[in-house]
Amino acid sequence: MQTHFTIDCVIYSFNEGKLQLLLTERSVYPYKDWWALPGFFTQKDEEMEDAVKRILYEHTGLKDIFMEQLGAFAGVKRHPEGRILTVAFSTIVKYEDVKSKIKPMTSYMRQAKWFPIDQLPDLAFDHARIVQESLQKLKHTINYSTAVYELLPEKFTLTQLQQVYEAIIGKTLDKRNFRKKIANAGFLKELPEVQKGVSYRAARLYKFDKRKFQKQLGMM
Amino acid sequence: MQTHFTIDCVIYSFNEGKLQLLLTERSVYPYKDWWALPGFFTQKDEEMEDAVKRILYEHTGLKDIFMEQLGAFAGVKRHPEGRILTVAFSTIVKYEDVKSKIKPMTSYMRQAKWFPIDQLPDLAFDHARIVQESLQKLKHTINYSTAVYELLPEKFTLTQLQQVYEAIIGKTLDKRNFRKKIANAGFLKELPEVQKGVSYRAARLYKFDKRKFQKQLGMM
DNA sequence: ATATAGTGTGTATTTCTTACACTATTAAAT
DNA sequence: ATTTAATAGTGTAAGAAATACACACTATAT
């Protein structure tokens, strides 16, 4: 009637034109030396939401990030200690925000590292399945959430935005149609500035207008 | 690090033109005499999927029904015994299939009863929230799942099908547009038979062609 | 000056969505 | 036999949204 209870985090980011996933290298039994999703046991009488915050913080140094629940994954045979139930959560973080904060080591993991989503190593436990389900969900919700904007810096170009979409859905999109759709949605704010330091025509910068987005969501 | 682990079931059906939810009346502390989702503790080292099957069977007499996971709901304060984590599952059953099988009583519940979704009593624990999330998900997935067809008898009329849609999304639909869309989708099989025993023009009967549905899903 | 690499834009076509009203069929009542 | 009540069944036009598609512009490096 009782079970071990862990949290696993699916943490996405975007860098070098690719969707990236944060993994940790385990330094303890079981699955010692395997890569796994950042995750750990909850503490006695700890609220699930608090556990998620704590574990996220311990792995990324990030606070106050909303994590969405993906679901529960349980298995009697997953772990020698008996049944373990893990609740997986996912979030998306800006690459620049975390890259300096990732802790290189804790007592149970040797290192944390970003992997492009299409070059993942074999994963411990049933984590490959968790990642797969999470990705599927991300593809579905991409258009109704602020997810993509979490992946970009505050000011971004339309090409960058398009790259994020393409990285997530795994298809290329027509530039003109993409821009038309974005313009139509109407929750980007065009900035007076342009890109700097590029050796070609500098692109206009935009930022995401959360208020307009919320308003439009209400209409649907 | 350990927690109590329960399963709760959101079981829908369709009767008298309304979406119905199966609830049980608790006969034990806590929330004695309250209505609650059918649910119970998992057993030691029982796989989650097995627990779901068992609990569904104990409450409805149904076997071999696929239940979809809604998510985990945890709370330290939910129960005097400390933290309880419940994983909610939902399913949809044909009303005729279960109405005779519902067990009237177990050691911890006095009775089970169907309630129209818009006339639910106050619910125990955080079950109102679970139902709310479940409903929201059902509305979203209605078009991409076989859910509605689970609510209907094998042979059904287009009007019945439309009523199910309307009951779930909570809006009325235009008859012609609805039929156009259904025809377009193309996974209904028109039967040579018509309705019987009605005192007005008998409607054509259809049945759901699972194979065609699967094929089309693959394309998206 | 020119090569490079990415930015930025318009239009025609098709597909999907929505709004809307009458005739056909059947059983029951008269 | 006729009427009534109840539901089944059907098409079209207008507007909105999605798609397919090609070329000129500009900042920089050499």
Image (spheres, coloured by chain):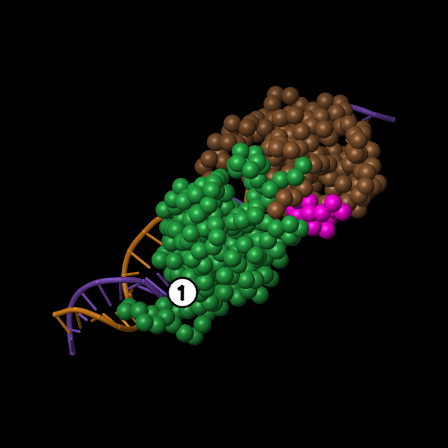
Chain colours: A brown, B green, C orange, D purple
The residue sitting at 78% across, 36% down in the picture is: A24
Residue in the foreground of this view, choosing between A34 and A16: A34
Q: In this view, does B155 lie above or below B50?
A: below
**Residue B167: x and y, percent?**
40, 52
**Residue A52: x and y, percent?**
64, 33
Residue that carries the numbered disc 1 in the rendered image? B157
Residue in the foreground of this view, choosing between B207 and B110: B110
Residue in the foreground of this view, choosing between A203 and B185: B185
**A77 part of magenta stretch:** yes
Residue in the foreground of this view, choosing between A78 and B207: A78
Image quadrant in which you'd find residue A170: top right
**Residue B49: x and y, percent?**
62, 54
Residue kind at label 1, given as amino acid type = Thr
Chain designation of label 1: B
Location of the N terminus of chain B (image quadrant)? top right
**B188 part of magenta stretch:** no
Residue sitting at the far top: A192
Residue B85 seen by the camera:
yes
Element marked by disc 1: loop
Residue range of the region highlighted in magenta in the rendering: A72-86
